[in-house]
Image: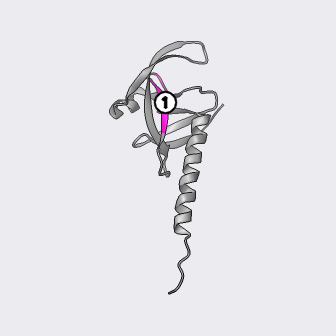
């Protein structure tokens, strides 16, 4: 099931889709090209119609648009992808947890009471 788009930094802001059926995150080749990603291998991807595509695999660091902490993500780099970035639900959950940790840290820093001297 594909849900609403999310905004992520890769660095720079790109639109992404949360795909609960994705076993590997995908980034469109034109988005990945200026990032000079380190390539760690290759995979054969199969779409829902059974078509096969060769893709290189690279490491990316990303975060939700208003988060502080970057999360490492392994992505296949695809020429033919309608979205800029396709994220598996497990990665979306990881990004959300990172954002929540950032929020709780920044709130605890700003909620320190100041006493009168």
Left or right placement of residue 109 versus residue 48 in this view: left
Left or right placement of residue 2 versus residue 26 in this view: right
Depicted 111 relative to depicted 5: above or below: below
Q: How is the image coloured?
A: one colour
Depicted 82 relative to depicted 93: above or below: above
Depicted 28 relative to depicted 3: above or below: above
User: Which of 75/108 is in front?
Assistant: 108
Circle 1 residue:
74
Direction bottom: furthest residue: 117
Q: Is residue 81 magenta?
A: yes
Direction top: furthest residue: 51
Q: Is residue 33 magenta?
A: no
Direction front: furthest residue: 117
Number of numbered discs overlaid on the protein picture: 1
Work out which quarter of the rendered image holds the N terminus and state it.
top right
Q: Which residues are magenta?
A: 72-84
- Which residue is depicted at the point 59% across and 46% down? 97
- Which residue is depicted at the point 58% across and 39% down? 92
Residue 71: give x, y in percent of width and height: 49, 41
Residue 28: give x, y in percent of width and height: 44, 28
Q: Residues within 10 Å of mark 1 (few under 14, many from 20)?
A: some
Residue 74: give x, y in percent of width and height: 49, 30
Q: Secondary structure at mark 1?
A: strand
Residue 77: give x, y in percent of width and height: 44, 25
Quarter-wise, where is residue 89 in the image?
Answer: top right
User: Which of 16/105 is in front?
Assistant: 105
User: Which of 85/62 is in front?
Assistant: 62
- Which residue is depicted at the point 55% across and 71% down? 112
Quarter-wise, where is residue 19 in the image?
Answer: top right
């Amino acid at each position: 099931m594909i849900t609403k788009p999310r905004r992520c930094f890769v660095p720079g802001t790109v639109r992404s889709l949360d795909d609960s059926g994705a076993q590997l995150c995908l980034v469109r080749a034109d988005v990945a090209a200026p990032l000079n990603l380190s390539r760690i291998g290759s995979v054969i991807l199969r779409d829902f119609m059974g078509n096969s595509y060769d893709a290189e695999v690279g490491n990316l660091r990303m975060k939700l648009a208003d988060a502080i902490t970057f999360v490492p993500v392994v992505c296949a780099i695809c020429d033919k992808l309608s979205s800029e970035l396709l994220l598996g639900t497990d990665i979306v959950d990881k990004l959300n947890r990172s954002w929540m940790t950032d929020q709780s840290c920044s709130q605890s820093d700003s909620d320190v009471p100041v006493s009168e001297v």
